[in-house]
Image (cartoon, helix red, strand yellow):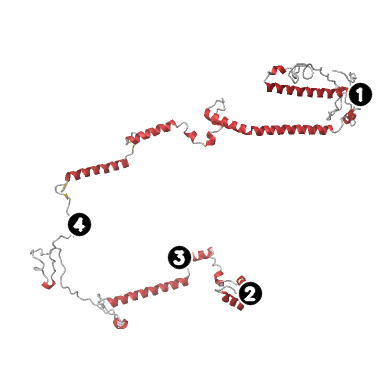
Amino acid sequence: MGGWEASTLHRDFEGREPQSWQESLAFYKHSQINRPFADEAYAKPPRVTRYEMSRREAEYNPITQAWRDEGRERVARERDAAHTLRTRNLAKDRQLAFERSSHDVINHTLRRTGLPDAQSEAGLTFPTQKREQRLAHGMDSTAPFNIISGLSVEEHHWAPPQHRPRIAPPREDTKLRSITQQPREYDMLSNEYKREHERRTAEEHERARRVAAERFWATHDYDVVTSKFYDPDKEARAQQLTRAIEAEQPLRQFNKLPPSYQQGEGYVYSITNFSVSNEDLFARFKAREQRVIDAKAHKWAREAEITARAADAAELQQSRTLNRPSHNRYEEATSHGYDIVTNKGYFDKDPAALAPARTVPKPSHWERLQTSSNHFWNTRTMQTQQRLALSGRPASEGAAIGGGGGGIGGVNALDSTGSARGRPPAVPALDMSRARAPIKQLEMTAGSSVRTGGFK
């Protein structure tokens, strides 16, 4: 689209909406490539540098009152001289045109010699002084009579009768000419009021006393010599305030501390002898601690239970991990009686280090019997103790349970009905570890006899 078409569209669209889609697109395209204002409106302002400002500041010398540029100074002087000459000529013309004397009073020469007639040239009219025609002469004195003869100015006056001052007839009601003509309430000769002298004098004395009291109390509040207030009531209040301050002085600095410091442990008891210094604060401190403990007791118990179960599970997992391989591997590795790497015997004078077994040997029949018997009687003992606790019977009746009856759980244990009955003797424990030890290893033990089993 050419420039003429764009300008035509812009001129056509001014003040109206586009009538078609084509006109809308044309107007939009025109607004994208053309500015709505002239290029001068988008010009950046001139950038004034510090150098230009310094040159402008140095153009004129304030001391010599002259421009530093000779040409500019010459033009300025010529302009000032022309302005001065024009001003003087204008003043001279005004003086010659309006002054009544047209000659010089010193040498009596005509000042307009050689000049055209100002009245004929400029059409100016000179002001002429006319005598004021007054019918009556103004009064030379404020007195309406002649001060020498005492006669009225209408009868005795130096001016002709038609020019004498006119005296107005006296008014029936007096006219106030100044404030000094007002009637006075106070007689300056007798120093008394003309009316109600006693009452007004008493009022003045009372008013003066109040003013004196106000001025006295305005400048007299505290006596620095006696260190007291002049007002007794104010002195009493000050003494009461001082006593209150002295009463709270020991805790004044403590009360300025933040609440976190005031309620800290350091102010509850002495860290030297652990003596409680503030019972109330100590009780609140312990109550706060107890509330925290009570609030977290269930959580701690739950955490302890979870920890115990986790420890049991970890121990069970570890035991299962260790029990997966057979204990026979350890026995086979140590059955020859020496270390296969260093060829040192396990029972020599300088024996090789024998690593302890991490696996558990398979229990024998006697160990299984003893373990199952202990578990059975321990369970019965716990059940019996629970029944005694629920029934309220003394615990001494079940003292033989798990105790001094000898053997596994004792021979005087109570049955489910609470009566004592005999138990079979406990199964003696066997030293099966030495019975299962390798024969060759035991033979190498110095001064030891080989035993294949038996009771302790």
**Closer to us: 444 or 352:** 444
Disc 2 + disc 3, Cβ < 8 Å: no
Question: What amino acid does circle 4 point to?
Answer: Ile
Q: Earlier in the sequence, mark 2 or mark 3?
A: 2
Q: Kindly identify which residue carries mark 2.
A: 22
Q: Relative to 104, is 299 on the left or the right?
A: right
Residue at position x 56%, y 69% in the image: 42
Q: How many marks?
A: 4
- Between circles 4 and 2, the one closer to the viewer is 2
Mark 4 sits on what residue? 179
In the drawing, does residue 56 fall left or right of residue 443?
left
At label 2, counting other C-alpha atoms closer than 10 Å, the crowd grade (few under 14, some 14-19, many 20 or more) is few
Q: Where in the figure is residue 193, as x and y percent of width and height?
A: 17, 47
Sequence-earlier tag: 3 or 1:
3
Q: Which residue is mark 1?
A: 439
> Which numbered disc, 1 or 2, marks the residue that appears first in the sequence?
2
In primary-sequence order, the first of circles 4 and 3 is: 3
